[in-house]
Amino acid sequence: MIITPFFMSAAATVTVTTDTYTTPSSSGGGWTSYSVRQLVPNAELSATATSTSVKVTFRGPASEGLGIEQAFIGQATSGGNAWDFDGNQVQLQVSSSNSFDLGVDSNVQTDACVIALDPGADVIIAVDHTSDTSKDSIAQIADTGWRYYYKEGNTDEADETAPSSFVDGGFDGRIHVKAIEWTSES
């Protein structure tokens, strides 16, 4: 029999972004072969302890789906460009697959991935879109403080720590990301 001492704590799961994904303020097709970086500001993260694992819930656009070739999550670097990882990013998978589709107006949750994210740092979620023109739509959701950056042209850069030449989406809001489930030792 294993007895857990009273001073050892169990894992706590908290959703660190609120589900504010509502009707898109704009959307559109033509997003094939783009790399997109979503900056999640630490002010939006309600966790108080370093994560042991995370799951991300993505939301599909209202008009047509979106194909994701690969997706990564990690902390933003304290220097460099706003879209840069600190170098410890990990791949997000759905049902153990690196690529997945966001269906029309539906949620897709990733498998849990092991990563230590500091609740005091910004988080980056990077995705590469597929080249499938039947699944190339995004939805922009206004959300103050959130920012996204993009690059077109079959770049396959979601996994890169410090890719160059991303463009500021010029929009306070989120694309793709509905929620982050953050598990930590409490």
Image (cartoon, rainbow, N blue to C red):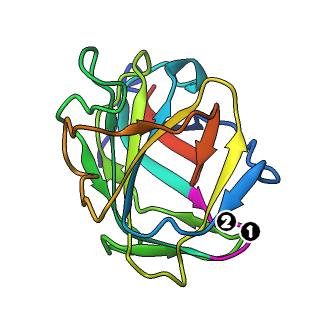
Q: Is residue 10 visible?
A: no
**In the rendered structure, does residue 61 fall within the stretch colored magenta?**
yes
Q: Position of residue 80 (x, y in %)?
A: 24, 20
Task: Find disc 1 in the rendering and name its residue.
Answer: 62
Which SS class for mark 1? loop
Name the kind of residue labelled 1 in the image: Ala
From the image, give the main secondary structure of the stretch colored magenta: loop
Q: Which mark is residue 36?
A: none
Query: On the picture, is 128 further left or further right than 17?
Result: left
Q: Nearer the viewer, residue 6 or 134?
A: 134
Q: Which residues are magenta?
A: 58-64
- Residue occupying the point 42% across, 46% down: 150
Q: CA distance from mark 2 to mark 1?
A: 4 Å
Instruction: Please tell me whether residue 66 is drawn above or below residue 111 in the rendered image.
Output: below
Instruction: Please tell me whether residue 73 is drawn above or below residue 185 in the rendered image.
Output: below
Q: Which mark is residue 61?
A: 2
Q: Position of residue 151 (x, y in %)?
A: 36, 50
Instruction: Please tell me whether residue 139 is drawn above or below residue 67 in the rendered image.
Output: above
Q: Position of residue 152 (x, y in %)?
A: 37, 56
- Residue sitting farthest toward the right: 23
Name the kind of residue labelled 2 in the image: Pro
Tags 2 and 1 touching, CB below 8 Å: yes
Q: Is residue 108 visible?
A: yes
